Amino acid sequence: MQATGKLYDGLEKLYANRWTGRERAAKSRLWKVLCDSFLSRYVSRDATVLDLAAGYCDFINNVEAARRVAIDLNPEMLCAAAPGVETHLASLERLDEVIEPESVDLAFASNIFEHLRGPDALLEVLESIRNVLREGGRLIVLQPNIRWVGVAFWDFVDHTLPLTEKGMIEALEVSGFEVVECRSRFLPYNMKSRKTYSEALARLYLALPPAQWLLGKQMFLVARRLG
């Protein structure tokens, strides 16, 4: 994400205001279910896995891999990362300055690209991601789909770049990726809700594609870096 500006200088305050301690704990439990029941199938235990804009490290803390790396601008990431997770405080535009070129097998981008300043920034970030991926390495994208989210996309002050799955695919393809899996609807828009989502209900949701087609407002894509 862009590393300058008042908004990005106050990331720690912004997210501390957005998520209460109770909400963060509930979100962490749901992410464990998501990783155990779904995302782990994409992660090889001998791989190098990179969590982009890792935030509270809900993904990288819950997967098993030979090398786990997290990058973010929010200094709270340093405290959130589990033992054994390598951390870097840097912007995504500087990704290939802190991560070795062609050293990553799998990169994970959850709810990131909607925060970028525009299409040019998206292509710049995708280029940086491509540079650190090995040939054939994969990028997983979990992203609000403006097609289904609608005006609720603007409920968060740091949302600036609306995308559909078609726009995301186009950006990936012009950046040297091949999209190998695309779900227009996958997860609900966000986990910040007055409703209580149990781990059992989350597992059931992941096991029932019709529920995702009905309630999903985030896209899910897997893209492979071409040579």
Image: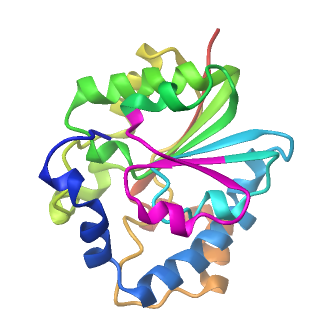
Screen quadrant of the C terminus: top right
Point out the residue furthest to the right here. Answer: 46
Q: Position of residue 70 (x, y in %)?
A: 57, 49
Question: Is 208 in front, or is 198?
Answer: 198
Query: Colour scheme of this structure image?
Result: rainbow
Membership of 80 in magenta stretch: yes
Q: Quadrant of residue 44?
A: top right
Residue in the image at 46% along x and 18% along y? 173
Q: Position of residue 55 (x, y in %)?
A: 45, 60
211 left or right of 35?
A: left
Can residue 41 be seen in this snapshot?
yes
Point out the residue furthest to the top here. Answer: 227
155 left or right of 73?
A: left
81 left or right of 97?
A: right
Membership of 189 in magenta stretch: no
- The magenta segment is 69-92
Up/down of 194 relative to 160, above or below: below
Screen quadrant of the N terminus: top left
Q: Position of residue 29 (x, y in %)?
A: 60, 79
126 left or right of 78?
A: left
Q: Position of residue 108 (x, y in %)?
A: 57, 44
Q: Quadrant of residue 40?
A: bottom right
